[in-house]
């Protein structure tokens, strides 16, 4: 493999075949549920240690998921011992996978059954890392958010700090970091316009461009293109980078977000707009 897709369960929605076809690479999907930038950094450091650093790294970003857990066992519970270190893995295993995380996972499953929601099911392809989400829900998305959402600037700076470390590692080892803007529902994007401004102000040293699906695309308000509110389908994911025109400057994406937000009555006259 000469390319990797990294990120959370949302990254798993990107089929490697689409990257192979459009970018001419041989990609593997290294996305993991609840994946975060600290975990991505550790995975890439492990790839360096085994001399397997890819030539290209595709990193999808979600403006509504800038916060990530800061507990050591959050990484340990979903990574191989070779990545986080065997000693640390053994020490934290009972506290993480068999402890509170398992308890809350069981509580969540019980609530799903009580609410009679379809049980999430996955199909995993070990040859490519691709994951198929085998569930759908009846969804309706508003075109506009109810109110703006603001993330603590300290959290955004921490996010940027990890992003810079990932970019530095990639650059040091001859890899290209390519940013993607996850096609989460339009209202969720517009609720975080101020967060986007703060983020883009700080990540110019990492990249000045990003692949995105234009906000005018009505698929961003069509529930048929999503498994649930947090997970979009592969067809929508592929549309993010289906042509060179989808790659725009951070300034252009921010302008699109601001203009779309201003068109929403719920946000007109809101703070920071």
Image: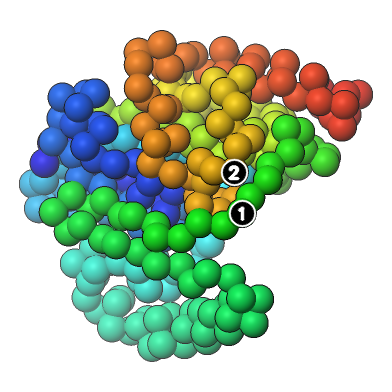
Residue under pointer 1? 138
Query: Relative to 228, does residue 60 appear above or below in the rendering?
Result: above
User: If the image is split into quadrants, where does the N terminus sit?
Assistant: top left
Residue at 15% in and 41% down: 53
Residue at 64% in and 82% down: 114
> Where residue 137 sits in the image (x, y, percent)?
57, 57
Pointer 1 or 2: first along the chain = 1
Which label was assigned to residue 223? 2
Decide which of 165, 139 is in the foreground and name it: 139
User: If the image is split into quadrants, where does the C terminus sit?
Assistant: top right
Which label was assigned to residue 245? none
Residue furthest to the right in view is: 269
Q: Secondary structure at mark 2?
A: helix
Q: Secondary structure at mark 1?
A: loop
Task: Confirm whether residue 116 shows in the render.
Answer: yes
> Where residue 260 sits in the image (x, y, percent)?
71, 20
Query: Relative to 53, does residue 229 appear above or below in the rendering?
Result: below
Near mark 1 (Cα within 10 A), the count class, few <14, some 14-19 or many ≥20, is few
Residue at 66% in and 22% down: 257
Query: Is the residue under label 2 in contact with that under label 1 (CB below 8 Å)?
Result: yes
The reply, left or right, for residue 70 in relation to residue 53 is right
> Where residue 146 sits in the image (x, y, percent)?
82, 41
Query: Relative to 257, does residue 104 appear above or below in the rendering?
Result: below
Indicate the quadrant where residue 95 lies.
bottom left
The reply, left or right, for residue 146 in relation to residue 218 is right
Residue at 56% in and 31% down: 219
Query: Relative to 182, does residue 269 appear above or below in the rendering?
Result: above
Q: Tag count in the figure?
A: 2
Task: Confirm whether residue 67 shows in the render.
Answer: no
């Amino acid at each position: 493999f000469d390319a990797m897709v990294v990120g959370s369960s949302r990254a798993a929605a990107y089929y490697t075949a689409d990257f192979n076809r459009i970018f001419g690479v041989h990609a593997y999907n290294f996305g993991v549920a609840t994946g975060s930038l600290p975990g991505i950094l550790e995975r890439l450091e492990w790839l360096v240690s085994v001399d397997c650093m890819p030539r290209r790294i595709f990193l999808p970003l979600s403006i509504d998921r800038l916060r990530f857990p800061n507990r050591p066992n959050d990484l340990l519970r979903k990574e191989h011992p070779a990545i986080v270190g065997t000693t640390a893995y053994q020490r934290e295993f009972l506290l993480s996978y068999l402890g509170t995380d398992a308890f809350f996972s069981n509580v969540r499953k019980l609530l799903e059954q009580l609410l009679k929601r379809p049980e999430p099911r996955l199909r995993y392809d070990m040859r490519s890392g691709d994951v198929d989400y085998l569930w759908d829900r009846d969804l309706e998305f508003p075109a506009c958010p109810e109110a703006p959402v603001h993330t603590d600037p300290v959290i955004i700076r921490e996010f940027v700090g990890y992003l810079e470390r990932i970019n530095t590692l990639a650059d040091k080892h001859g890899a290209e970091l390519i940013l993607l803007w996850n096609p989460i529902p339009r209202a969720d994007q517009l609720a975080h316009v101020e967060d986007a401004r703060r983020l883009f102000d700080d990540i110019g040293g990492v990249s000045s461009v990003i692949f995105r699906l234009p906000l005018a695309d009505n698929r961003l308000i069509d529930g048929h293109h999503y498994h649930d509110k947090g997970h979009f389908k592969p067809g929508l994911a592929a549309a993010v980078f289906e042509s060179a025109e989808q790659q725009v400057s951070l300034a252009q994406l921010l302008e699109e977000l601001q203009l779309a937000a201003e068109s929403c009555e719920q946000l007109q006259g809101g703070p920071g707009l």
